[in-house]
Every structure is written in structure tokens, then in C-alpha cells.
Image (cartoon, rainbow, N blue to C red):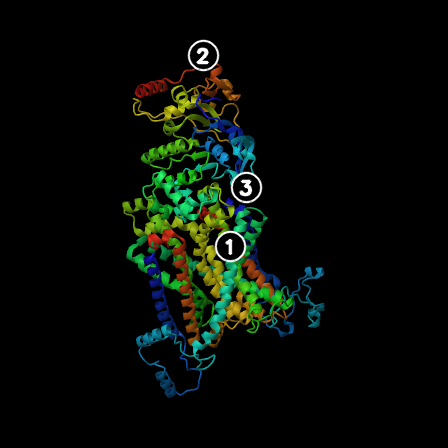
Amino acid sequence: MERGKDTQPAVLQVENLRISFQTTAGKLRAVRGVDFTLHKGETLAIVGESGSGKSVSARAIAGMMSENEKIEEGSILYTYEKDGSTVTEDILKFSRKRRAKELYGKKIAMVFQDPMTALNPLLTIETQLTEGIRKHLSLSKKEAYQRGLELLAEVGITEPALCMKQYPYQLSGGMRQRVVIAIAISCHPEILICDEPTTALDVTVQAKILELIKSMQKKYNLSVIFITHDLGVVAGIADYINVMYAGKVVERGTPDDIFFHPRHPYTWGLMLAVPDMNTADDRLYTIPGAPPSLLEEPVGEAFAPRNPYALPVDFEKEAPLCRLSETHEVYSWLEQEEKKTEMPEALRKRIAKMLENAV
Amino acid sequence: MFRYVLKRIELAVVTVLLVIVILFFLMHLMPGSPFNGDRLTAEQQALLEESYGLDKPILVQAGIYVKNMLTGDFGVSYAIQQNYPVAKFLAVRFPVTIRISLQAFVLGLVLGILLGIAAALKHNSAVDTGASLLSMIGSAIPSYVFALGLVYFLAYKAGWFPLTYDAKAPFLSSVLPTVALSIMPMSMAARHTRNEMIEVMNSEYMALAELKGISRFRVIVVHGLKNALIPLITAMSPMILTLITGSTVVEQIFSIPGIGSLFINAINAKDFNVVISLAFIFSVLYIGIMLVIDLLYGVIDPRIRVAGGEKR
Amino acid sequence: MTQFRRNKGAVAGAIAFLLIILLALFGPIVSGHAYDDVALTVQNLPPRIPGLEKLGIFDGTVQGIDMYELKGVSDKYFWFGTDTLGRDLFTRLCYGIRISLLIAAVSAFLDLVIGTTYGLISGYYGGKTDLIMQRIVEIINGIPMMVIVSLLVVAMSPGLLSIIVAMSISGWLGMSRLVRANTLRLKESEHVQASRVLGTGTLTILFREIFPNLLSSVIVMTMMTMPSAIFMESFLSFVGLGIPAPQASLGSLISDGYAHMLTYPYQMIVPSVFFAVLMLSMNLIGDGLRDALDPRQKQL
């Protein structure tokens, strides 16, 4: 799908990805046929609640898989420069060795959710920061140290030299996450995958980290995949959004599309569930019910049981893809209907207010 | 860090002193006086006791005793070799025991760690199950059972190794006892290393380390091993204790002239002075090693250094 | 429970353990001999088991010579052979197991009682009491158990009682540490605090609120200390400080057998095997219990 005129070419193309986990309770179908595309220099946000399959999909790109995880189907096509020419390869097929050699650090980097556990408690920041640099950029210890200092300053650490000597437990959560980001960008990767990087941080720190990621992206023309369940976070940084539920994408579009013209009932639910100080309601909206257990392949649309707008066909067949505009797509049976189903009144009011305030 | 070191040393010293005092009083609990065996008149006995200072009040004796022990004056043997200074016994036998115990410990630890890593890397494979089984057996069954087995099959039946320790062939004849003693530390090391490595490998920082694209070797060794070994250090102190106990019996089996067999002989001969002195030596050894382990702990885990050693 | 059953090792251990106990309890009745039947006419006979002897093993022969025939007692069966004094080893083994288990059980029980109480008090009261109590623990810990035990047994003259007393002196340390650690943790939990606010007496709190939560760890720990008690006893026997004759324990049997290892290997091999199996099975059970009851400590 296109994005807009200034979009750079696609860097990553995920096609029909199906991933399952072998658990003691049975086979868990975590990702059930997911497509999305990442373009160069853009921030792609993948939004969904816990269990939607967003993390699993992104981790598959990084090649980080558990022992009991299996790629059932699909491909992840990565377009990059190799020996002077542009090649496109299915990185799912890469062996672990090849991935470590060609992709990790150099092309793909990842920022994890919990900065407390992402850093090795027994090694200094210097060691952890410079080892990748020394390996990939072939710098000497001194040079790597210098580069490390620069990086730390870039990510906003006020006393880089002191920080280098410290151990992770001596840093605050925000600082740790900055270090993790520094490590991630240290070897100039093309793709940065951020798996809920701000969820474990205080709200004030969150904003700063998001800013940081955005500025890094601009500076290095990074392609970022940003995974989150928090719509508020998404609003600030996404260039394009994919909404996932129960292992599938249900709607995708630009922030404008999704926030002002959402079409999927699940997206409506998500938007309404964000507490809004301006509403007069005294009750918080939640989507009734719970996500389905993916031990069984759902029949029809997975969201149907919780969907107040569900049609009979939603319980029988999976919804087809509908192109609403150049950038906006949704998987919904509602679009086939003669009469357009309108979003809930409450939501329409909210959006109207948002637009008002924005002007 | 400094405070931590100081605290540990202080504890060790206090313990040693208290041990000496306790041992002293225990010695007095032992039935009879050292001179019961000889045929002496009551008068002669009293005279002898006076010359040995045994008639002084208890507390004074205790004080003298403490002083003696600390300066290495362990008195003389009463039964094994009349009037032979215990310290001389020790000088000859101590190094032997230390050598074999150290050999066993190092061998066991190194092999155990390697085995543990292999088992963790090939998690849930035949290697893993096999290693786990072996370590289970090795840690449950005391070392001297293995020693007996080894002696019977490899020394007696197969004749590959000498039956007993021979000072003229120190290396070859120390192989069997070393192996027997090493099985326990090896099993425990393997088990702990395996478990810890598996946990460590699942942690996020390992994933991040791998994502940096650095060599797998570096990931496992530099990032993983260090973290995995810390709990191993905690497990080492009970290991040392069992090693000391085990070496006593093993020395007996292989007729090794070390302090373990001396201890047993002294007990059987009711040579209390030797027994107590050796008890003291064992205690000091044990306390000393525990101190070293505690300090090692502080060196490897930076969190402990700064926290001042409050973790115990 | 189910998790324990799932653990194959633990189940195997439990079965083996039960079998050994049954053997110890009922063996002597079945064998028809007494453990102190000294009879020099039948000394040092190799094992002979009816039924199995048809297969060529346990047929009472040593290098082809039928020792039973030699001594003129072809009508007798000594299942595990006899020792130098002509006593039936099978029966002695059974009695030996009984004694070893008894020692293990009693010392484990004492460890439990002393260690738990000590740990509870130390952990619950905290402050100075705790500091002093813990210092004592550290100091006792500094003396190797072997030393304490040996010294006490020598001082008190060997025997069942002295062994048990000696082992109780330092055996409870591990238990008390475990209990104390857990008590410290549980002390701050809400239900304990609630009880305190209600004015419940300390003793009641300790035994009604805290102890039940410790139970699983305590059970596991007890199961794990039994093997070390048996080990300590066998060590003492080996050294000559154990159970005096004519009684037998696994350790003394091994020790006696060791003396004749080269000539009558079975005298040493049989008790050693049983000893090893006993230790192994207790460890397996202990591990299984730990995995089942205290998942936080889950290890192999």
C-alpha cells in the first residue's frame, strides 16, 4: 500500500506471517497471517493489547524466537545494500549464524521494554556499550570509548564519562533506557525495533524517551517499528499505524486515518477506552469480554464475540481487506454493507473535540 | 567494599577465637587426664600435672591454651607418639592433604562447570539428561563410596593404579583419591552451572547481547557465565565442608599420610591433644576458606561491594 | 502432588525408598536368621539366593567352588552371604538400614524442632535478639560438623544416643536459616500485620500465621537433611566411632566389609549398593518435593 508522496521505498515487507507456540496446553496460534510494510525513515506503530501478537511479530523480524516457537508460514523481505547493489531477501530463512553476522547490530537493532533487565548487571556501561562498536566498526578500545561518550551525550546523559564507569543498578530507569537506545544505534542500524520501550517508565520520562527516539530517527534516517498498547504514545510519533487484535491486523492507516476516521469496531473500542478528562461520563469505557485464547483457531472474526456491531457473517468467515483510501485499509465485513455503520456517538464527539482543540 | 572486607575478617577472627575456647572446654570434658595410661602414683601424677600447668585454674589454662594455639604451639601427642610435637606431625601431613583436596576441588569445579555449560547449551538433549543424571548420582552418594568402588575396580581388579598412596609416585597414586573426591564438587558445580546458565540464557540482557551481533562465544562467556557463576560461589561453602569430611575417609582408604587419617588414628588412640589440635586446624581451614569465598563474592558481584555486604 | 508424580526421578526415588523400608522392616522375619547369630562354622560365605542360583549368580560359589558345600552347610541359604563372624549379612543389612533410618529420622526431627523454633524466634523478634542469635549460628557454622560430631562422640563414648546428640548440635543450622529467612519475609505480609493489629499473641501468630506458610519449605529441607545425617553416621562408623558391635548400621557394615574388600568383596559391595541407593532415593524425593511444593526454588 502507498503511504504518500514523500515516502521512501519499502525496507521491510512482512507477508502472511504465521507463528505458533508449542505449549503444555496445546498449540498457541499467536500470529495468524499478518502483513505489514515498513518504509525507510518512517515510524511504523503496531498497536494492540497484550496477546495481540504484536511483540511476537516484531521479534520475529529481529530473529528472536523462543525454543517452542515455530514459524508456520510467511516471509519477511528485507531490502538492503549488499556489496554495492540492492538486494531483497527473506530474512526468516536466514540461519542464526547468518543473522548474527549480517543483521544484528549492523542492520537491525532492538530496544526492549524493561530497561531493568535488558542490561547485564555485572558489566559496566562501558563494556556493554563498546563491545558492539568494537566488533562492527573495528575501532580500538580507545576509539570505541570515545564513540561511546559521544553516543551517551547524544542520548541525553549528562555525565557520559561517569556513566561509562557505572553499573546498571546505579542508573535510574530513564537513564538505563537511554543507554539501551545508545547501544541500539551505536552501529548505525537501518531498522530499529522498539518493543514497548516506555511502558516501564514514569510518564514524564516517557515523553523524553519518545522525543529521543524521534530525534535519533530523524538524524540517522532510521526505520522504526514501534510496538505499544498505548494510543497516546502512538499519537506523538507514528507515521503509520497498524492495529492488531488476536494475531491479525484489523486496520491500518496514517495517524489521521486512525484517529479521525477509524473504521474498525475494535479501533473504536480502543479509542474510547482511553480515559478522557473532557467527557461528562462517570464510567470508564471498556471493551466487554476478553481476548480469545488462541489455542484454537477462531472461526470467522476473532473480535466478533465482543463486537457490538458484529454481523452474522463475522462469526463464520474472516473479513476481507477493504481499501478505504490510498493509505487507509480495514479488514471488516461492515464495509460490504450498503449502509455505512457509523462510529459510536461518544467517539464522534471526542474526535470533534480533538479537531477543535487542534485548530 | 572495604567495610565488607573488614566485616568478614572480623567475623572470621572472632569465630576462630571462640572455636579455640570451645575446643578447650571440650578437651576438659574428655574422660580422664592425659596421663591415665601410664602407671603413676597419685603423687607422680600430681607432679606431672603441675609441670604441664594442668593444676592452674581453668580460666588461666584457657588463656594459656588460646595463646599456644594461636602461636602454633599445639602441645605434644600423648598416645600416637609420646611427646612428639603435634606441630611436627602437621608439618609433614598437612601439605599432602591440602594438595589432594585442592586437586580434587579444582578438577571437580572445572569439569563440573564445563559439563554444566554443555548441558545448558544443549538443553533438553541427551547430553543434558545424561549430565543431570550423573550429577544427581554424584552429589547424592558420598565420596568414599566412589573411592571404594574406584579402589576395587581400577586398582585391585584392573591394576591400573596403585592401591595406596606412595610418596615415591605422588602423582599416579594420587589420581584415584583425587578423582573420588572430585566427583562431589563436579556434580554440584555441573548442576548449579547448568541451572543458572539456563536461567541466564533466557534473560533479556542475553538477548540484547546477542542482538548486538557479537560472537556467540563472547555472549556466553562474558555475559552469561559471570552471572551464572555467582550462585555457584554460594554453593561452594557447603562443598568445601563435604570435601574436608570426605577427604578424611578417603585418606583412610588410600592410606594417605594426611591430616585426615591422622585425625582418625588420633581418635581411635584417644590421643586427645592431637584430636583437639586437628579439630582446630580443620576449623581454621574451614573458616578461612569461607572468608575467601565471601571476599570472592564481593569481587565478582559489584552490587555487593557498594551495598556494604548486607546480602547474606 | 501431581507435579511430584510427574517427576519420574522423584517417583522412582520414592518407590526405591519404600522398598528399602519394607525390606528393613520385614526382611529379618523372612530370612529366618538373627543379626547377631555368631557361628564360626559358616563364616565368610558368599551370597546364595534360592531361585536365582539356578541362573548362575548368587549361587554361593567363589570362583567355581561351592563354599557352602565346602563348609558342609548346603542346606542353608544366606541371601547376602555371611561376615567374618558367620552372621547373616542380609539380616544385618536390614537391621543396619533400620538403625540408619532411625538415626536419620530422629536427627531430622530434632533439626526440625530446634531449627524451626530458633529460626522463628530469631526472625520474628529481629533486632538485638536476632543479631545475637545469628552470631551464634555463624560461629557454630564455622566449626565443621565433622569436627563437632567426632569430638562429642569421643567425649561421650560411642553409641546411638551420643551420635544423635552430636548430630543435633549443628544439624539444625540450615533449617534455622531457612526458617528465619522465610519468617523475615512473612513477618511483613499483610495477614501477619493484621493479626498483630488485632492484638493476637505472639505465639499464636507464629504458629498459626507464619508456620503453615513455611511448611512446604520445611518439609523439603527435612527431606534433604536426612541423607546428610545418614552420611554423618556412616562417616563415624567408618572412622570407628559409630554404632558399637554387635549392632549394625549401614556405615559399620561398609566399614567391616572394607576390611575384607580384597578377599570377600561382596561384604562391602552389598551394603555400599544399598547405601548408595538409599541416599540417591532420598535425594530424588527431596528434589521432587521441592519442585512440587516450592516452585520458586525450582531446580533440576
Whichever of callouts 3 and 2 sits on the residue coming sooner in the sequence is 3
Residue located beneath label 2 in the image:
A339
What residue occupies the far top of the structure in this picture?
A338
Tell me the quarter of the image containing the C terminus of chain B. Answer: bottom left
Residue A61: x and y in percent read: 50, 34
Q: Residues within 10 Å of mark 3 (few under 14, many from 20)?
A: few
Task: Write down the quadrant of residue A128 in the picture.
Answer: top left
- Three-letter code for the amino acid on which mark 3 is drawn: Lys
Most foreground residue, C42 or C183: C183
Which three-letter amino acid code belongs to the residue tagged 1?
Answer: Ile
Using residue B13 as the reference point, say whether residue C217 is left or right of it. right
Q: Are marks 3 and 2 on the same chain?
A: yes
Percent position (x, y) of residue C290? 47, 50
Q: Which residue is mark 3?
A: A97
Q: Residue at x 30, y 58 (%)?
A: C129
Say which of C245 and A99 sits in front: A99
In the rendered view, does A48 fall on the left or right side of B116? Answer: left
Residue A16 in the image: above or below residue B231: above
Which chain's residue wears label 3? A
| Residues at marks 2 and 1, CA–CA distance in whole angstroms | 70 Å
* Residue C13 visible in the snapshot: yes
Output the chain of dot 1.
Answer: B
Q: In the displayed orientation, state which residue is furthest to the front.
A: A84
Residue B298 x/y as whole percent: 38, 56
Residue at 49% over, 65% down: B101
Q: CA distance from mark 3 to mark 2?
A: 54 Å
C-beta proximity under 8 Å, tags 3 and 1:
no
Label 1 sits on a secondary structure element that is: helix
Residue that mark 1 sits on: B113
Are dots 3 and 1 on a single chain?
Answer: no
